[in-house]
Image (tube, grey):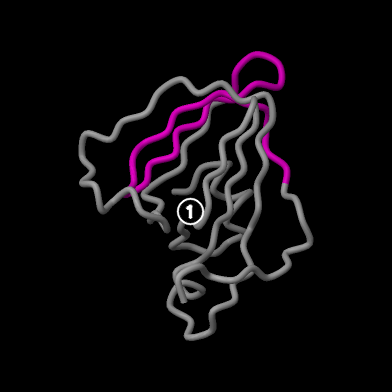
Amino acid sequence: MSTPIEDFLYQHQWAHFVFEFTLGWKRLVLKLVTQQQIEQECAMLTPVVAEFDDVTMTGADFSYCTAGDLNLPWDIIGFDCKSNLGDRWEFVLHTCGGEYCFEASWPRLVGDGSTMERSGE
């Protein structure tokens, strides 16, 4: 069973990967791609870009990771969320590259879905 954040971000597609994870001042931007996009021969991807505002990181766990697991893209094992008071949410992003816990406003999808080039190819 999917969570509300998975429904919102995955748009009824599964096997997503974190292609880019950018943490800035009270802001987190995730760029997500599907398994099919990862496997494509083409070097261009069209990511789902989600921007979380008013972010507070509350925890991270890398105990099950090896050094190689920290290289992107990260396979998303699960993405949980829980509503807090007001417009705040608790999120837990479980990936093969670690578990990331944070509080934030509900994300918005940004950009026009334009393609981006895969690095290293």
> Is residue 36 placed above or below 112 in the rendered structure?
below
Q: Is residue 99 magenta-colored?
A: yes
> Image point 71% across, 22% down: which residue?
87
- In percent of width and height, residue 68 lies at 25, 53
Label 1 residue SS: strand
- In percent of width and height, residue 31 lies at 58, 54
Q: Amino acid at mark 1?
A: Val
Between 108 and 43, which is closer to the camera in this rendering?
43
The magenta segment? 83-108
Q: Residue furthest front?
A: 120
Q: How many marks?
A: 1
- In percent of width and height, residue 91 lies at 51, 31
> Is residue 112 placed above or below 53 in the rendered structure?
below
> Image point 41% across, 52% down: which residue?
76
> Is residue 52 placed above or below 90 in the rendered structure?
below
Q: Is residue 70 magenta-colored?
A: no
Query: For residue 99, what is the image quadrant?
Result: top left
> Is residue 108 placed above or below 88 in the rendered structure?
below
> Image point 52% across, 46% down: which residue?
21
Answer left or right for 114 relative to 92: right
Q: Residue furthest top?
A: 85
Q: Which residue is tagged 1?
A: 18
